[in-house]
Amino acid sequence: MATITAKPVAEVLEEAHLAGLYAGNIAVPTQYDVVNEKQEVIDTLTDGLCGFAWITIRPARGPLVAHLKKMGIGDKGWNGGYEIWVSHFGQSYERKYAYANAFAWTLRQHGYDAQHGGRLD
């Protein structure tokens, strides 16, 4: 694990958020057609399948987590760590997952232990 940077926590979080927004915006979700029993297209899911994504920071303490708590962002993870659920990009699993991946990657570049996860709804 890299040494935690001297960059202020607020700046690291802003950088991670902007990286996540960029990744989510450029993601190209797989488009799905919804068909009826006659195989007629009745709807198209242009933003892909529905799902969730999150970032887990371990351990659930330290200046980064303290700042997140102060801002009212995230919560204690059910499997340990501190979790931030992605609330951007509606129900699009692929966009949310891209955001979480970029956010966690940015935190890791600044020395924090951060992973991303997701699941389809």
Image: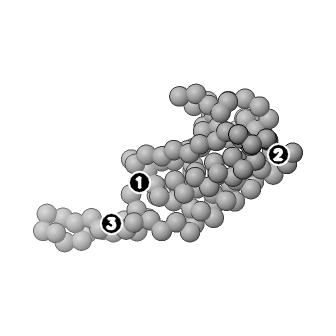
Residue identified by numbered label 3:
32
Secondary structure beneath disc 2? loop
45 lies above or below 70: below
Q: Distance between the residues labelled 3 and 1?
A: 11 Å
Give the residue type at disc 2.
Answer: Thr
Label 2, label 3: how many angstroms apart (C-alpha)?
A: 42 Å
Asked which quadrant contains residue 114, the reply is top right
For residue 28, side relative to residue 55 (left or right): left
Instruction: Return the disc, 2 or 3, that comes first in the chain's sequence.
Output: 2
**Residue sitting at 58 percent across and 51 percent down?**
100
Q: In this view, does 117 lie above or below 97?
A: above
Colour scheme shown: one colour
Q: Give yes or no for contact between labels 2 and 3 (Cβ–Cβ under 8 Å).
A: no
Disc 1: which residue: 50
> Does residue 88 appear in the picture of this structure?
no
The percent coordinates of residue 107 (x first, y second) are 70, 47
Q: Mark 2 points at which residue?
A: 5
Camera sees residue 111 = yes
Mark 1 or mark 2: name the one nearer the start of the chain. Answer: 2
Label 1 packing within 10 angstroms: few (<14), some (14-19), many (20+)? some
Mark 1 or 2: in front is 2
12, above or below 1, in the image: below
Residue 104 lies, in percent from the top left, at: 63, 48
